[in-house]
Amino acid sequence: MVRRERRSVTLLGASGSVGRATVDLIERGGADYKVEAVVGGRDAAALAEIAVRLGASLAVVADERQGGALARALEGSGVASAAGPSAAIDAASRPVDWTMAAISGAAGLAPTIAAVRRGGTIALATKECLVCAGAAFMREVERAGATLLPVDSEHNALLQALGGQSLDTVETMTLTASGGPFRTWPAEAIAAARPQEALKHPTWSMGAKITIDSATLMNKGLELIEAHYLFGIGSDRLEVVVHPQSIIHGLVTFRDGAVTAGLAAQDMRVPIAHALGYPERISTPAARLDLGRIGTLTFEAPDLTRFPALRLAREALEAGGGAATILNAANEVAVAAFLDGRIGFSAIAGVVEDALSDADAATLRNAPQTVEEALELDALSRRLADSSLPEAALQAH
């Protein structure tokens, strides 16, 4: 077999769950990859370990307070270190063939856009880039001639199920949702849920923020918005179905009635490998599906009464303008408050709805024209959401 050309890579969000899965694949690929930079949030020890294991040229911790700890951990390793948001952007700007963009939340937007602007292939796991600044972000991708590959298992499944067909042949695209830990819970029990209960995802092992988003179904709402921009498809052709087994990740229904589906085990190394090897296929250690053993796959419609976050996200998508940016910012504030014990679970959607209701008409009507404008609106929306937390907390308890 002919060995393909060595690929230079940078990992943004290297110490998170997606980052670690990517590290595993790169280590297995050995000489196929040269790691230029790894960027993490605040865990200097974990980031240093990854940098040394991968032989990275540079390690950057976004939290400036952890810069000294990172430098000490890397002393004598030959890996350079830096700290702070600007250093993360500089690292993302280094010329490489392939970048994993997996910094969670709106904090990932600036480094990811820096990677986009210098071109190459961007494996996108930070859905907030498209939720916060969808149209502006996609314009930057087009302007730079970058290749954007989705790493969320649902969008990656849709890309593969589409099979290169024109969007004109597509009737609908369907994202699947596990339903989260509260899928069968009554509304009263959901309202009283504690963080430790919300963090017990039934099928996936993920970071805290995305796990809470899965419990509220906001994650699926954000994915609807992401799919709209990734594939250029309207809300009226995007559907969500709850599929507790998490075996089918996305389905494409064509205008002739044929349906193709992307199936895989619950292992993020599958979609990451698709992006890492693209356009070729690379091997992964992910479990292979045994449908005879699985036996039954079930589906149900999402309950928008018990899980209003999904409704709010679709309404934001259909409203356009700055609504999705506000939705995402308010949700990040509310999830952090819930994890800190400051508000109850049901108040998460309430904080988001209040932020959308309180935004002025012009802000809702006008979409950010640049990534910088999106970041300004994100900051403003966070302040609005944060100011509503005391009232939300009283309502929740």
Image (cartoon, rainbow, N blue to C red):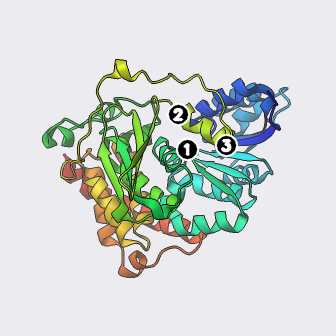
Q: Disc 1 to disc 2, how far (Cα)?
A: 8 Å
Going by the numbered disc 3, the residue's amino acid type is Tyr
Between disc 3 and disc 2, whose residue precedes? 2
- Quarter of the view holding residue 38: top right
Q: Identify the residue at horizontal 30%, vertical 58% (top origin).
A: 351
Between disc 1 and disc 2, whose residue precedes? 1
Q: Disc 3 to disc 1, how far (Cα)?
A: 12 Å
Describe residue 296's horizontal placement relative to residue 363 as left or right: left
Q: Where is residue 370 in the image (x, y as percent from the top left)?
A: 59, 72
For residue 75, which numbered disc appears in the image?
A: none
Residue 174 visible in rendering: yes
Please tell me whether mark 3 or mark 1 is closer to you in this view. 3
Residue 387 visible in rendering: no
| Residue topped by disc 1 | 151
Q: Where is residue 307 in the image (x, y as percent from the top left)?
A: 24, 49
Pointer 1 with pointer 2, Cβ within 8 A? yes
Q: Does 360 appear above or below 106?
A: below
Going by the numbered disc 2, the residue's amino acid type is Met
| Residue topped by disc 3 | 278
Describe residue 334's horizontal placement relative to residue 12 as left or right: left
Secondary structure beneath label 1: loop
Work out which residue is located at the far top of the displayed protein and give it: 293
